[in-house]
Image: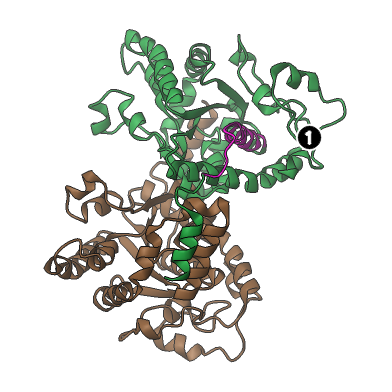
Chain colours: A brown, B green
Amino acid sequence: MGKHSSGLAGPASAPEDTAARSGAKKVAGWDVPPVESLRAPRGFDLAAFDRASTPGWSQGRKQAERLLDAHADELSDLQERLFAEGRSGGNRSVLLVLQGMDTSGKGGIVRHVIGLVDPQGVQHTSFGVPTAEEREHDYLWRIRRALPDPGYLGVFDRSHYEDVLVVRVDELVPPEVWEARYDEINAFEQELVASGTTIVKVALFVSLDEQKARLRERLERPEKHWKYNPGDIDARKKWPAYQEAYQAVIDRTNTEVAPWHVVPADSKWFSRLAVSELVLDALRRLDLGWPPADFDVATELRRLESA
Amino acid sequence: MGKHSSGLAGPASAPEDTAARSGAKKVAGWDVPPVESLRAPRGFDLAAFDRASTPGWSQGRKQAERLLDAHADELSDLQERLFAEGRSGGNRSVLLVLQGMDTSGKGGIVRHVIGLVDPQGVQHTSFGVPTAEEREHDYLWRIRRALPDPGYLGVFDRSHYEDVLVVRVDELVPPEVWEARYDEINAFEQELVASGTTIVKVALFVSLDEQKARLRERLERPEKHWKYNPGDIDARKKWPAYQEAYQAVIDRTNTEVAPWHVVPADSKWFSRLAVSELVLDALRRLDLGWPPADFDVATELRRLESA
């Protein structure tokens, strides 16, 4: 773990008192620990949120990319410990929930951050328009089925939050139905946390201009056409309604047990580094050891030598 | 794709005629294309198989590791094309089936080879002792449920072949039941291939000595204890019966549509490179392009500019 105090430390003027006040430890490279700088504060105002900013980080892109690379070994090591624990009777897991408008970079985060760990330990689910079977059930049914097993790092690309986002914006259910869901979701997440799952909720916010540039790129490059969907423009036209729905999500589901992190997404290098830090922090806080042997080592060594 | 003809080309004496005879193309770094050198030949004799050999490869470990690294970009690119095709209505997929005794390196292959591609495009399943629910069904039931969706790279860590391996060795069903399964498996795989799945079957063969060394390492290193299972020694004691069962698998399920590749597994660096080549070859043979737009690009560009 020596890399945490390596040459990537922040400037001397880093406001360590912020970290001290909140109880979060100084994190190499960051002026303010990312769990602090990215956590949605009480009274978070999405309309005023700068989507090109890099909260807590004053260095540039190269340093961010280097730091993300440097996280690979520790991420891998902690994920393996979590997996080992799950295989040895432990019940803990980590669930990364990624929310964000089209082009906010959810897929890139999975590829570049989650791609750093052993795919055997990852359970990834992408939630699209519900299937006929899914529509026959409660909205949390498909979510429950996709929850990470003990020892796994679960990743949700979109999630149950779609049921208070697109569902609210497009009025797919009556207001009293989606209105009730915020509390239902909080209760659901509390239950999840109580059963051993650490939930890392990340809302990625891209600006209207940057989204336009990214959609244009999908249209101008034939190898990106498959990522483009004319419906993306329809959602874009409802931008204010979506922002309002996201504001409500943060206002009403930013709980102590499952807080929201709000990540500016105009710089992909920043949002990727940011999410890697949030996942790392969640894994570190589990204080993962290696499971003790549930067999007698000396006996097994003897058995092995004569086998 | 320039890397395929890069500085890693084999010695001048490479038997290109072998490749020419079989129709397989020369592969950079290899004396004989790995799809040729690793494909189980007619009359394959497992007892005579050298598990420390590196068929088709005369260079060393460093070169192999460098070549595996160099495959990352192409593997990623082809996997994304496959995924894009699947998202655009295509029905093709690739399924890597990994079989091998304990410590033969299946997990390391998933981590180091499959870990090179986007986890969003991978569907990985590890098949252990069947659960109560699985035992209520036919042995292929759990296999069918885990088959890759269109566009995905499926990975089976163990597979339906366990139902003619451990099941045969431990006499978990009467002989006439497992006897019938070879033909059933061939029919099943033929059906799979006909429905668009390319099956890459890999049997990893580790030597008795190397297995002992690897099990000893698991016992001597506390961070590896979780990987050790006293049952591993029991299976080791039945080594000849397992070898016989593996020989029968190769003899009876080495079909044209889903041939076996036999990979010596005493050198992890070799088996990892070997499997990367086999997966790459399968992807290359799909001749994957990028799906054409199913919308009018000019119209969408106009819609975007005014949205």
Which residue is rendered at x = 55% and y = 36% of the image?
B105
In the picture, measured across the screen, residue A48 lies left or right of residue B207, that is: left
The residue depicted at 46 percent of the width and 24 percent of the height is B193
Magenta region: which residues?
Answer: B270-291
Q: Is residue A139 visible?
A: yes
Q: Quadrant of the N terminus of chain A?
A: bottom right
- Answer left or right for A109 relative to B277: left
Q: Residue furthest left?
A: A176
Q: Is residue A280 visible?
A: no
Residue B231: x, y in percent? 41, 31
Q: Residue at x 51, y 52 (%)?
A: A225
Relative image position of residue B147 (x, y in whole percent) = 39, 33
- Where residue A260 sits, quadrant-wise, is bottom left
Amino acid type at circle 1 is Gln
Query: Which corner quadrant of the image does residue A116 belong to?
Result: bottom right
Residue at 21% x, 56% y is: A139
Q: Is residue B271 magenta?
A: yes
Camera-nearest residue between A161 and A122:
A161
Q: x%, y% of residue B206?
A: 59, 28
In the displayed structure, A192 sits above or below B53; it is below
Most prominent secondary structure in the magenta stretch?
helix
* The magenta stretch spans residue A259: no
Q: What residue is disc 1 on?
A: B59
Question: Where's residue A203, x and y in %?
Answer: 38, 70
Q: Is residue B271 above or below residue A307?
A: below
Please state if A51 lies on the left or on the right of B71 as rendered.
left
The residue lying toward the viewer, choosing from B123 and B273, is B123
